[in-house]
């Protein structure tokens, strides 16, 4: 077993808030622990028990007010570090200056996140969207300033201070930094504006359809230009390696495409109509309480019965109201879990439908929440393995689905569980389908809106889906195509792992749950997905037998829903 890479492993370990002391420590004191100590805050390799030794701010979300940040306020922190390039100084003094700079950078990014949450909560408010874009620009300007002051120090005679703080070799890394005018997410200002415009139009696809298609084509052009400027053969290569840090290539996932078409598409064909019909009836069931309060109560009940570690995270989620689960026509129709770095607290955003799907959606996001809760993210250099994070979230839905019959009743629970499993099968098929669609679109020499529709139509039909009026534009409804192309494959490969966990839970509930909790405890910034599967003794994603075996087990599982022992 080898630990997953981090772009700069020592730095990530040094500044991540994962080993900070508990109880009574300030943010600054927690960061000082990261920069000092016998092991410099480095996390041990391998899956560990869920850590209790993590600093959190214990701040309610309602007290995290957004306010615009003036970059002039960053100058004293930058100048304090810059002085070491000219004058040098003690390691202790340098570490203290870096600590203060990091704290301010964490605050700036958290303000950016808060602004984004507000904009997503009301996509009709152009002022909120503008403020979110301004906050984004401020953060990335601050990031450039941080990196450039480190570069100046690395080019000076006092570069040893960098290695003394972050670890050997990091001075070389800082020395090579060149500002690109783009954010760490690879987005230019134009990209962000186009994505924001897409969300503004997405609430009425019919009225905004033509503009949405034009936006997509322009985004593809921009991203292909970005890939060329960074020396990549394709944007798919850049996204797989540079943005999402995968240890496999766009060519490798053709095995996933084949497995989805050959083994999972037939399962959908056999089961989807029946389960959809049952799900539609449950959606219309007015006797099922789908209020935010009840959905949270059920999540807590399931968490408490499955694991004290899960319940601890749940109690923190609810005590500090780290969620926005409201339903609104103005709200972006998405769900995500983000990290509030300054407070070291995760946050869940979801556009509620007020149907039973809200239960499964929250459980999915809770998997992300728990992962962040026990393995806080590193802001500057952490590169989470998205496949592993999605397995952690999808696996949460699976293990909790075994309790549905107990918490909401037998008939409703069985339908909900079937719907969860069907969604995972859809994740395998759709994840593969959208990756193939995106790879083909980005490979097109002269892309037009009409050609996008043609490509999607061809790919869609090849996965066994039946055509319907307007199906060739279904791709416009998937926000990932606009904001996060090439992320969707993570849903496919992670769903395979989640469905295997489902199979294991049916065979031996305790062993299956234990295996999932082991996966959940792994830090996604230390583990590649393929390595995590191997460590947890789950099947490989590029083995054709994997798809056949799991698809067969899924087909059997959709007929019954045995209860998982609590």
Image (cartoon, rainbow, N blue to C red):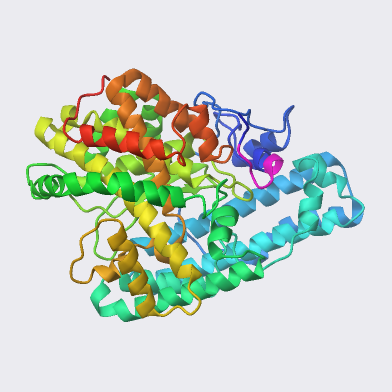
**Residue ID at (33%, 33%):** 549
Q: Is residue 478 magenta?
A: no
Q: Is residue 548 visible?
A: yes
Quadrant location of the N terminus in the rendered image: top right
- Residue 221, percent from left and from top: 51, 75
- Residue 355, percent from left and from top: 17, 49
From which residue to which does the magenta span run? 4-11
* Residue 550 in the image: above or below residue 379: above
Q: Is residue 508 left or right of residue 388?
A: left
Query: Which sits in the foreground, 253 or 34?
Result: 253
- Residue 96, percent from left and from top: 75, 43
Query: Which sits in the foreground, 503 or 214?
Result: 503
Residue 164 lies in quadrant: top right
Q: Is residue 112 left or right of residue 337?
A: right
**Residue ID at (46%, 63%):** 439
Query: What secondary structure predominates along the stretch shown in magenta?
Result: loop
Q: Is residue 128 left or right of residue 139?
A: left
């Amino acid at each position: 077993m080898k630990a997953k890479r981090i772009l700069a492993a020592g730095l990530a370990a040094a500044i991540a808030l994962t080993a900070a002391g508990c109880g009574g420590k300030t943010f600054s004191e927690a960061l000082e622990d990261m920069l000092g100590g016998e092991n410099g805050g480095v996390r041990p390799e391998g899956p560990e028990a869920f850590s209790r030794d993590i600093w959190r701010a214990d701040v309610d979300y309602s007290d995290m007010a957004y306010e615009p940040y003036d970059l002039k306020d960053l100058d004293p922190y930058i100048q304090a570090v810059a002085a070491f390039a000219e004058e040098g100084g003690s390691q202790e003094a340098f570490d203290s200056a870096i600590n203060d700079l990091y704290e301010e950078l964490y605050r700036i990014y958290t303000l950016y996140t808060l602004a984004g949450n507000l904009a997503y909560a009301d996509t009709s408010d152009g002022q909120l969207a503008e403020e979110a874009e301004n906050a984004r620009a401020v953060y990335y300007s601050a990031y450039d300033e941080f990196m450039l002051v480190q570069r100046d120090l690395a080019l000076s005679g006092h570069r040893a201070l960098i290695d003394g703080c972050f670890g050997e070799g990091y001075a070389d890394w800082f020395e090579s930094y060149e500002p690109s005018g783009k954010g760490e997410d690879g987005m230019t200002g134009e990209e962000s504006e186009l994505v924001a415009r897409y969300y503004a139009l997405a609430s009425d696809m019919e009225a905004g359809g033509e503009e949405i298609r034009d936006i997509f084509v322009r985004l593809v052009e921009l991203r292909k230009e970005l890939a060329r400027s960074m020396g990549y053969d394709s944007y798919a290569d850049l996204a797989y390696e540079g943005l999402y840090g995968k240890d496999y290539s766009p060519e490798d996932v053709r095995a996933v495409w084949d497995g989805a078409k050959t083994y999972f598409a037939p399962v959908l064909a056999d089961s989807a109509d029946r389960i959809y019909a049952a799900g539609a009836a449950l959606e219309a069931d007015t006797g099922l309480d789908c209020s935010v309060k009840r959905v949270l109560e059920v999540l807590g009940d399931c968490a408490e019965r499955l694991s004290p570690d899960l319940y601890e995270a749940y109690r923190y989620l609810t005590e500090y109201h780290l969620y926005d689960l409201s339903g609104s026509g103005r709200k972006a129709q998405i769900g995500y879990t983000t990290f509030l770095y300054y407070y070291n607290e995760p946050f869940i955003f979801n556009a509620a439908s007020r149907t039973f799907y809200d239960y499964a959606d929250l459980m999915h996001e809770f998997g992300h929440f728990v992962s962040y809760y026990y393995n806080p993210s590193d802001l500057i250099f952490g590169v989470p393995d998205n496949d592993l994070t999605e397995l952690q979230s999808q696996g949460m839905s699976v293990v909790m689905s075994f309790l549905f019959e107990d918490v909401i009743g037998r008939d409703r629970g069985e339908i909900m569980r079937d719907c969860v499993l069907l969604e995972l099968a859809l994740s395998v098929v759709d994840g593969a389908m959208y990756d193939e669609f995106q790879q083909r679109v980005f490979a097109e020499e002269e892309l037009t809106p009409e050609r996008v529709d043609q490509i999607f139509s061809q790919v869609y039909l090849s996965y066994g889906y039946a055509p319907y009026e307007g199906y060739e534009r279904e791709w416009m409804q998937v926000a990932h195509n606009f904001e996060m192309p090439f992320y969707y494959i993570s849903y496919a490969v992670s769903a395979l792992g989640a469905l295997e966990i489902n199979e294991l839970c049916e065979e031996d509930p305790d062993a299956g749950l234990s295996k999932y909790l082991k996966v959940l405890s792994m830090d996604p910034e230390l583990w590649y997905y393929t390595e995590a599967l191997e460590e947890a003794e789950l099947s490989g994603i590029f083995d054709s037998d994997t798809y056949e075996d799991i698809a067969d087990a899924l087909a059997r599982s959709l007929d019954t829903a045995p209860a998982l022992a609590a």
